[in-house]
Image: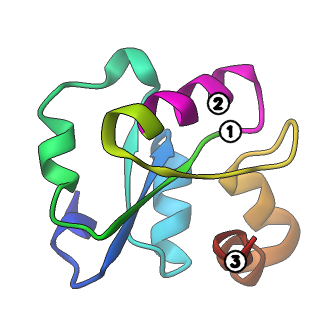
Amino acid sequence: MLDLKKDSPFIAVAEGELDTITLSICGIPAVGVAGVKAWEKHFGRCLADFDTVYSFADGDKAGGSFASFLGREVKARPIRLPKGMDVNSIYMEGGADAVRRLLQS
């Protein structure tokens, strides 16, 4: 939640706590949600001051649903993760640079 206070034009929404922490460690301000069912209506207001909201959803069916939901709910731009991967697994394979490159794809 502290990343909501960072001076940044963008913020990422991750699917889960570990991915949220990993994004933050990589220099990408992030907040996490434990899936679509955990979303509360007021969460959108927390993101309203950011120019861009990115969704970092897991590379599975549930992640696709999460990204679609965030696109409708807060106009989040989806960051596509490879099938079967999440932010933390990408970090473990390629480090912080690999995670930051996701924003460029």
Q: Quadrant of residue 49?
A: bottom left
SS assignment at label 1: loop
The residue sitting at 19% across, 38% down in the picture is 43
The answer to which quarter of the image holds residue 37 is top left
Mark 1 surroundings within 10 Å by alpha-carbon count, few (fewer than 14), some (14 through 19), many (20 or more):
many
Identify the mark nearer the N-term, 1 or 2. Answer: 1
Q: Which residue is mark 2?
A: 63
As displayed, is residue 93 above or below residue 57?
below
Q: Amino acid at mark 2?
A: Gly
Q: Which residue is located at x 30 percent, y 79 percent?
A: 9
Q: Secondary structure at mark 3?
A: helix
Q: Is residue 69 magenta?
A: yes
Give the Cα distance between marks 1 and 3. 17 Å
Q: Residues within 10 Å of mark 2 (few under 14, many from 20)?
A: many
Q: Tag on residue 40?
A: none
The magenta-colored residue range is 58-70
Residue 58: mark in rendering: 1
Q: CA distance from mark 3 to mark 2?
A: 20 Å
Question: Which of the two labelled residues, at mark 1 and mark 3, occupies the earlier sequence position?
Answer: 1
